[in-house]
Amino acid sequence: MKTVRVWDLPLRLFHWALVVLVSAAIITGNIGGEYMDAHFYCAYAILALLMFRLIWGVAGSLYARFASFLAGPRAVLAYLKTAASASPEHRPGHNPLGGWSVVAMLTVLLLQVGSGLFSNDDIASEGPLAILVSRDWSATLTWFHTEVSINILYGLIGLHVVAIAYYALIKKINLVQPMLSGDMQTALDVPSAQDTRWLRLRGLLIFLLCCGVIYFFFLRNVS
């Protein structure tokens, strides 16, 4: 067995920051009222993280890149045929099905945040882009935000938790620990992600750029 660096530090920070912010956005959104300002700030932060992840899918380390885990239908079907196996063999990174679940999660989060920017509750809260569309469109996007995409998001989060439990209980593979430390133990001859100081600096600069974009478009005129 050897130790392989799988997840670079920027990706790990993205993952756990997203967990915290999505949880906070759900809680503040459900409470409503005076917590809606916090809900919108969570949304802006989530949007910055999503922008970062899309860029990092090209500029990140080996296992963070979309090209490393987006597989075709045949690869997904081949994986599904062996998914029930209790074999401990597990290649670093996302499996073919897990790769597409990442895409699904990112897509639904973008839809959730995007529709929220156009939302309007007709009482006290209004998304910053609601003035750009008609009241009917704003109402439709509000309905999509509160009734459709959020429920799809709940479903994806549930499937994510079930997958983690399945790997832990059936395959005896801990998927959480590598996302904390970045490393996993494997007997396979696979390359390690190059989680260097320069890659981390690149990640920081990209994230700051994403934050700057969000600030310029949504926060610079907020008093």
Image (cartoon, rainbow, N blue to C red):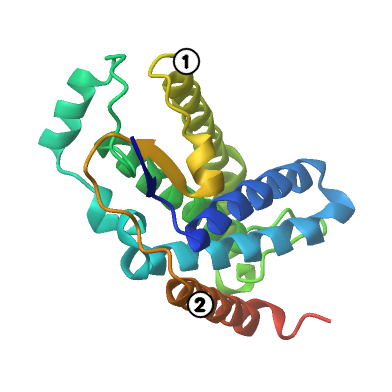
The tally of labels here is 2
| Kind of residue sitting beneath label 2 | Leu
Q: Of residues 30 and 5, which is closer to you in this image? A: 5
Instruction: Give above or below for 105 relative to 124.
Output: above
Q: Is residue 152 above or below residue 213?
A: above
Res 201 label: 2
Can you tell which mark lies on residue 169? 1
Assign a secondary structure to mark 1.
helix
Crowd class of label 1 (few under 14; some 14 to 19; many from 20; radius 10 Å): few
Q: Report the side of 213 relative to 30 (left or right).
A: left
Secondary structure type for disc 2: helix
Residue at 53 percent of width and 36 percent of height = 176
Q: Position of residue 146 (x, y in %)?
A: 62, 43
Residue 133 is situated, as x and y percent measured from the top left of the image, at: 55, 69
Q: Residue at x 53, y 38 (%)?
A: 177
Residue 99 percent across, percent down from the top left: 32, 43
Mark 2 nearby-residue class (10 Å; few <14, some 14–19, many ≥20): few
Quadrant where the N terminus is found in the figure: top left
Left or right of 215: which side holds 90?
A: left
